[in-house]
Image (cartoon, rainbow, N blue to C red):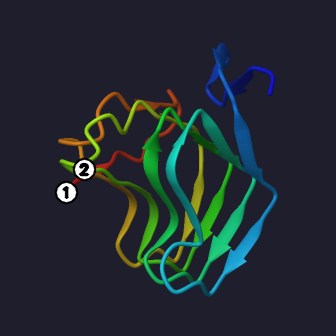
Amino acid sequence: FPLTTISGQVGTPVDCRGAITGNVCTENGVNGINLQSSSYMVVSGNMVSNNGTAGIGVSARYAVIDANLCENCTTGIGLFGGASSPNYGYHRIGINLFQGISGQNYQINTTYVPGVVWAATDTTMPVNT
């Protein structure tokens, strides 16, 4: 895959090895999109709604998450990690839209998910868990 960029950081290239784009994911028991143990993935242009836990759940490293719509989920986008996965993190988060989220727009475990870069125009800050 070619290099791509992230919203709010035009000209900042991001290596991409795969993409999850243009999907509509509704009424899944856990996460609408579950990115797990993958590196250098782009998750962009998806609509996730009415999912059990997170609209988009990421347990991986170096993901670009941008231009998604998350609605009617407990968490919009969850960046997860744990002691058994110490190298997760280093994501780039662009502008995503949220509607009807009952918990947090972004959930991040900063102890195990370091190095997250937020788009300069995104005013939604993460909540540590």
Q: Residues within 10 Å of mark 1 (few under 14, many from 20)?
A: few
Whole-percent x, y for residue 27 in the image: 62, 87
Query: Which of the 4 image quarters holds residue 17?
Result: top right
Q: Is residue 24 above or below residue 128?
A: below
Q: What element carries label 1?
A: loop
Q: In this view, does 40 lie above or below 23?
A: above
Residue type indicated by callout 2: Asn
Whole-percent x, y for residue 116 in the image: 38, 32
Front residue (pair 110, 85): 85
23 to the left or right of 57? right
- Residue on which disc 1 sits: 129
Indicate the quadrant containing the N terminus: top left, top right, bottom left or bottom right. top right
Q: Is mark 2 on a helix, strand or loop?
A: loop
In the image, farthest residue toward the top: 11
Query: Which of the 4 image quarters holds residue 75?
Result: bottom left
- What numbered label is drawn on residue 109? 2
79 to the left or right of 41? left
Whole-percent x, y for residue 11 in the image: 70, 12
The residue under the point 25% across, 38% down is 86
Residue type indicated by callout 1: Thr
Q: Does the CB distance between marks 2 and 1 fall below 8 Å?
A: yes
128 to the left or right of 126? left
Q: How far apart are marks 2 and 1 (CA)?
A: 5 Å
The residue under the point 35% across, 45% down is 125
The residue under the point 29% across, 33% down is 114
For marks 2 and 1, the one nearer the N-term is: 2
